[in-house]
Amino acid sequence: MTVAGRQAGAPGPARRRWGPHAATAVVLVVGLGITVALAVITAKGHNRTNVKLLALQTRLISDAIAASDPLYVEDHLGGAARLAAATNGDVALFRQGLSGAVGAKEPFATASLWRVDGGQSRLLAEVGAKPLLAPGPAAAALVRRAAASTTFVVTKLASGPGARLGYATAARRDGVSYVAYAEQPLPRSQTTQPASSPLADLNLAVYLGRSQTSAALLSADSAAPLPLRGTTYTTRIPFGDMVLTLTTSARTSLTGSLGVVLPWSIAIGGALLTLLAALLTERLVRGRKSAERLTAEVGRLYVEQRSVAGILQNALLPQQVPAVPGMQIAVRYLPGASGADIGGDWYDVVPLTDGRFVFVVGDVSGRGVRAAAAMASLHYASRAYALEGHPPTVILDRLARMMDLERDGHFATVLCGLVDVGTHEVILANAGHLPPVLCGEAGASLVAAKPGSPIGIPSPVPFRPAMVTTGAGGTLIAYTDGLVERRGETLDVGMKRLQEVATRNSSSLEDLLSNIVTELTGNSPTDDIALIGLRWLN
Amino acid sequence: MAELDPANEAYCVVGVSKENGTPVIRLSGELDMVSVEKVRSAVEDALAGESERLVFDVSELEFMDSSGIALLVSATRKARKVEVRNPVPIVRRLIELTGLTEILLMVP
């Protein structure tokens, strides 16, 4: 037997997909997104901390410069100018006053004293080396600038290794200004900070004025090319009538190596964790998909099994029975609602010669293919014994030898009847089956005959025949227990109900059977039902 | 299988005792195709030894179908006399109509 509909009706197994699933992609994207965000936040935080530290260190340096350099100039040069003003330009005292501050190893390389009266400036004295700012218009302009200023004035002289700063400061008396001028070499451009210094980590450049040009550069301690680029911090320090511009940048991370490593650690660690999570997700999703496939497959097999059961049932139990002259015969089979399992109920009609036939109704206990197979063997064996001309009791005796409850796990109740159409006589034998209903003009009644033991349950008591005779138009109805069995009530109640329906004799046998099924089960029986009706036409 | 509704599933409880050496198996609840599988092993354990007589006390068994019949009948292989004590009418009539009154002796 081929099972049709398998290819057509049932869906095949879902096609396998080896690409990542949507959930995995989401995990990957979200995980990497969080990782990148964390790494960026950490790096930014580190950067901010670096800038703060840079600012702090730079301010410390600028404070140190502001606190020392201008005071030195004020002390020495300012003192010399005030002394000159007080002594009307005493040159000897000027020389004496600056003698400790001017020299090759002293802060000032050279110093001079000027007298400014009205618009005229005149050099009074000179100490130390030859000044870079030679007497002339430039020197005169600087001196007049100092005379007009309330603080010392600064200028940068030359550039490169020999560069000097020129300072000039004035003291006034009776409208005459005495200006002390000095030049200071810029040796600091060569100094490097010792490694232990707090400045060791910084690139540092000091400019005179606000612009960071090489012409204005006073001092630098930098491993990086000037002007400094990247993250820099710039502060300005008042310096005489000018300002010093101090610019710094970090040589290495000021927060230590952790600050540099941390964002990368987060990025790499986060990426690895994300990858791991994505792999786990992929495994879970694949596992679920395969479980779903399995479920679908089981469902498909279940449906297939149901259809196989239905096909088997139909093959074993034809909806048509052989026609018997003088009789109207109708049958019904209703599968129970208890699932895919095939039932073990059956009916059969076996025409014989001389206007006789045998009918059989049986019910194998249990359900499933094994019960159906047991039913099939009893079904065909009973047909064979009937065709051989055996009476019902012998048919049941022989069936009883075929089956054993202990061995086969099943037993069967069987009602077998030999009908003589002409004489209206029915010889019955009953192996544990429910009694048939006989309908005549007086109404419907059960055929009372003591049942023998079911097929498969050995009993010392032999089967005994029972004879009933029907009138013209009489009807005999045999059935299996699914028709009358209900929880909470005895079988008698169901059989009583069956008699009531059968008493309301319908015009046709088909209608009668339909009424019985409808009224007793509502057309949805819980257990399988086999039903056969025999009606004498005259 | 799939159509089984747990709320409607029959239950059956087994209790085993001895009465003057005779095993008494007490069945209560409902004995049908589903519940019989749950009590089968308990009943088979109680039937482990051979004995002359065996009693099924079914006074609290409210329903039984052919699966229950098969369970009771299988006990007849273990004891010469199998007694079914105090069956309710549903159980009594099932045994009578199945033609087993000679094999399962109902008391009373």
Image (cartoon, rainbow, N blue to C red):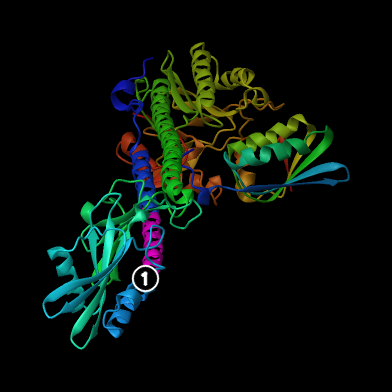
Question: Where does the image place residue A314, in percent across and percent down from the top left?
Answer: 39, 24
Q: Which residue is mark 1?
A: A98
Circle 1: is it few (<14), some (14-19), or many (20+) Cα within 10 Å? many
What residue is at 34 percent from the left and 22 percent from the top? A6
Task: Please tell me which residue lies in front, A156 or A312.
Answer: A156
Q: Quadrant of residue A318?
A: top left
Farthest residue toward the left?
Answer: A119
- In the image, is A393 to the left or to the right of A18? right
Task: Please tell me which residue lies in front, A393 or B35.
Answer: B35
Question: Where does the image place residue A325, in percent across and percent down from the top left?
Answer: 34, 20
Task: Please tell me which residue lies in front, A28 or A393.
Answer: A28
Asked if A512 appears above or below A177 in the picture, the reply is above
Asked if A288 appears above or below A414 in the picture, the reply is below
Q: Give SS at disc 1.
A: helix
Chain letter for mark 1: A
What residue is at 27 percent from the left and 82 percent from the top? A85
Q: Does A420 appear in magenta?
A: no
Observer able to see residue A477: no
The stretch in magenta equals A44-70
Mostly what secondary structure, the magenta segment? helix
Farthest residue toward the right?
Answer: B20
Looking at the rendering, in which quadrant would you find the C terminus of chain A?
top left
Amino acid at dot 1: Leu
